[in-house]
Amino acid sequence: MRTRDVNKEQLVRQKAIEIIVKDGLEGFTINKLAKACGVSVGTPYVYYKDKDDLIVKIVLEEGAKMEVAMNKNFDLEASLEEGLRVQWRNRFDYMMENPGLGQFFDQISSSSYHQQFLEMFNNDSAGFLANFKQNMGRFIDVNVKRGEMIDLPIEVYWSIAFGPLYTLMRFHQRNQSITGAPFEINEDFIWLAFDRVIKSLKIS
């Protein structure tokens, strides 16, 4: 049995993300992955059963890391504006530090894997998925009861609360705005959008 090499395993995961971002899931193969890593085609199978196992584990592992990063200094009892500002700060910093992951998760969300992860999301009773659901629900519930915001369906809340941030980040990742002009994100854009989000969520 071949020995597991932590550095090589990390390389396999990183190159898998890069290939999926560049070529899409349909262009991702174990042969292409092995070539990108400079290893034999059998090496990825030391760490993962197959392509599906690799993709699922990357999503779960990176999702757990993302959940930790996004909850840094986040107080579930904070005011709507204070709590969301921390969430935006954490999400923005994480996406800037891990530019490929946002595009990787975009690929997953528009693929056949999406339903699989939705089922895991709904059935998970422990781990980062449960923490994510509980934290988001608690924060919304606290601010609704406090009278800071109306009780919105979670889909509406999510779209308003984070949609503008993720749209700006997509423009940045593509280096192009909706008009086709060159675009690079900066703090001014982020907090201008944040101010409008708060105004739309707060009870006036």
Image (cartoon, rainbow, N blue to C red):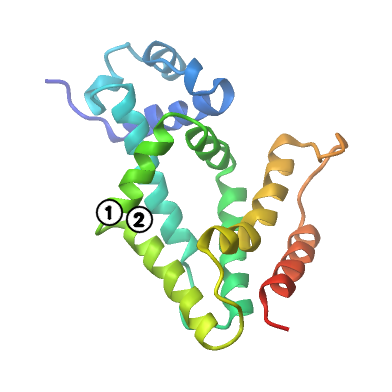
Residue 63, image x and y in percent?
A: 41, 48
Q: Which mark is residue 102?
A: none
Q: Residue furthest left?
A: 1
| Quarter of the figure with residue 31 | top left
Q: What residue type is disc 2 on?
A: Leu
Nearest the camera: 25 or 5?
25
User: Pointer 1: what residue?
Assistant: 124
Tell me the element at label 1.
loop
Nearest the camera: 103 or 93?
103
Name the residue: 37% across, 42% down: 117
As drawn, 161 above or below 113 = below
| Quarter of the figure with residue 173 | top right
Horizontal side of 85 relative to 63 (left or right) equals right
Name the residue: 35% across, 37% down: 116
User: Pointer 2: what residue?
Assistant: 129
Q: What residue type is disc 1 on?
A: Asp
Q: Residues within 10 Å of mark 2 (few under 14, many from 20)?
A: many
Residue 184, image x and y in percent?
A: 79, 45
Name the residue: 74% across, 74% down: 199
Is residue 75 at least partly visible in the picture? no
Residue 68, image x and y in percent?
A: 41, 60
- Mark 1 and mark 2 lie on one chain; the one further toward the N terminus is 1
Q: Residues within 10 Å of mark 1 (few under 14, many from 20)?
A: some
- How many numbered circles does the render carry? 2
Tell me the element at label 2.
helix
Horizontal side of 151 relative to 131 (left or right) equals right
Residue 66, image x and y in percent?
A: 45, 53
Horizontal side of 72 relative to 90 (left or right) equals left
Q: CA distance from mark 1 to mark 2?
A: 6 Å
In contact (CB < 8 Å): disc 1 and disc 2: yes
As drawn, 134 above or below 170 = below
